[in-house]
C-alpha cells in the first residue's frame, strides 16, 4: 500500500467516525418565569436561542406549561423557540411524578392534555412527549396505560439517550450567586463542561456495547441559568470533539428509539433502560451515570476548583 493511499484510508476513517457520532440538543422545563441571578427570564431565553443560532443548531424545547407558557409573557418566550425553527414538545402541565403512588394514571394523562392545549398553538409544535423525571410509572398498569394513551393520541415518546445532571450544577451555580453576586463562577463552568463531556463519552461507549454502533444521541438539558450562560461553550465542545449536531427529528429516526424497554429502575436514559432489560448489570463506569452530578459537586466542594477532564 502506498503512503498516499494509507493517508486517504485514514482520512476516510476519521471522517466517517466524526459523522457517525451525532447528538441532538433538547431542553426540558421551559420556559421558566422564575427569578434567577444575573439574567431575567427574557434574557435567559434569548441567551439560549442566541447560542443555538450562532452554531446553526436546531433543538427541541419540551414545555412544562405551568412554568410560564400558560401566561402571556411565558407563552411569548416559548413562541420564540418555534419562530426560530426549533421543535416544541410536551412535558406536562405542572411536572408531576408518575412514580408517585398518590398520582393516578388519569391525572397524569390530564396533565398531558392540558399542556397540549397550549403547545398545539405554538409554531414548531410536535406530538412529542417526554416523561417527567424520565419515569414511566411505579406500576405496570401506569406504564402500559401511558404507552397506550400516547399511541392512541399520536404521541412519540421523547426519549433521552444522553442524560445529564446539568440541573444539579445549575443549583450550585444559583446558590453561589445568591450568596455572592460577584463570586468567581469559572470553576462551575469548567465542571459543567467536564460533566457534559464525561456523560457524552460514557453514553457513546454504552451505545457501542449495546447496539454495536454509534447511535444518534438525544441529550437532555434544561431551560435554566447554567445553559443560558454557557450553552455556547457546550456546543463548541461537541464540535471540537468531532461530533455532528443533528436535529431531534433526525435523531429520533434512529431505530433504537422504537424500542420499549421495561425500565425496571426509575428515572434513567433509554440506554440504561436497555442495558438493564438485557441483564447487563453494573458495568464499568455505571456509577458515574447515575450519581446526579455528585462527582462534580464533591470535587468543587473539596478543592474549590473544577474536576479534571
Image: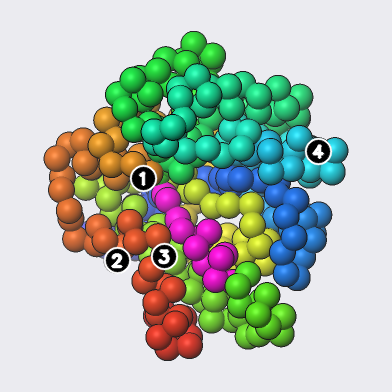
Q: Which residue is mark 1?
A: 268
Residue 162 visible within the image: yes
Classify residue 181 as left or right of residue 98.
right
**Marks 4, 1: nearer the viewer:** 4
The earlier-in-sequence mark between 1 and 3 is: 1
Q: Does 29 sit above or below residue 109?
A: below
x and y percentages locating residue 279 in the rendered image:
14, 40
x and y percentages locating residue 49 in the rendered image:
73, 52
The earlier-in-sequence mark between 3 and 2 is: 2
Q: Secondary structure at mark 2?
A: helix
Residue 293 bears which disc, if any?
3
> Where are the magenta residues, as a range?
162-173
Residue drawn at x 30%, y 24% is 140
**Number of disc labels:** 4
Q: Which residue is mark 2?
A: 3
Q: Which residue is mark 4?
A: 71
Amino acid at each position: 500500500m502506498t503512503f498516499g493511499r494509507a493517508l486517504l484510508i485514514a482520512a476516510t476513517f476519521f471522517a466517517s467516525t466524526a459523522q457517525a457520532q451525532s447528538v441532538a440538543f433538547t431542553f426540558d422545563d421551559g420556559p421558566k418565569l422564575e427569578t434567577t441571578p444575573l439574567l431575567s427570564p427574557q434574557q435567559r431565553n434569548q441567551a439560549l436561542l442566541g447560542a443555538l443560532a450562532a452554531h446553526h443548531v436546531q433543538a427541541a424545547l419540551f414545555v412544562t406549561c405551568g412554568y410560564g407558557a400558560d401566561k402571556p409573557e411565558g407563552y411569548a418566550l416559548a413562541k420564540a423557540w418555534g419562530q426560530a425553527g426549533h421543535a416544541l414538545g410536551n412535558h406536562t402541565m405542572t411536572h408531576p411524578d408518575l412514580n408517585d403512588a398518590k398520582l393516578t394514571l388519569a391525572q397524569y394523562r390530564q396533565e398531558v392534555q392540558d399542556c397540549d392545549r397550549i403547545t398545539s398553538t405554538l409554531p414548531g409544535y410536535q406530538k412529542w412527549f417526554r416523561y417527567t423525571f424520565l419515569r414511566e410509572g411505579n406500576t405496570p398498569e401506569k406504564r402500559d396505560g401511558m404507552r397506550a394513551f400516547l399511541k392512541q393520541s399520536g404521541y412519540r415518546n421523547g426519549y433521552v439517550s444522553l442524560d445529564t445532571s446539568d440541573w444539579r450544577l445549575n443549583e450550585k451555580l444559583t446558590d453561589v450567586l445568591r450568596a455572592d453576586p460577584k463570586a468567581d463562577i469559572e470553576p462551575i463552568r469548567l465542571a459543567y463542561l467536564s460533566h457534559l463531556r464525561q456523560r457524552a463519552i460514557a453514553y457513546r461507549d454504552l451505545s457501542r456495547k449495546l447496539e454495536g454502533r454509534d447511535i444518534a444521541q438525544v441529550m437532555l438539558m434544561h431551560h435554566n441559568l447554567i445553559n443560558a450562560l454557557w450553552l455556547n461553550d457546550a456546543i463548541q465542545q461537541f464540535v471540537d470533539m468531532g461530533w455532528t449536531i443533528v436535529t431531534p427529528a433526525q435523531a429520533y429516526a434512529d431505530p433504537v428509539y422504537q424500542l420499549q424497554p421495561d425500565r425496571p429502575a426509575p428515572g434513567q436514559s433509554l440506554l440504561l433502560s436497555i442495558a438493564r432489560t438485557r441483564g447487563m448489570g453494573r458495568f464499568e463506569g455505571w456509577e458515574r451515570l447515575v450519581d446526579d452530578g455528585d462527582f462534580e459537586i464533591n470535587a468543587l466542594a473539596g478543592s474549590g476548583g473544577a474536576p479534571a477532564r
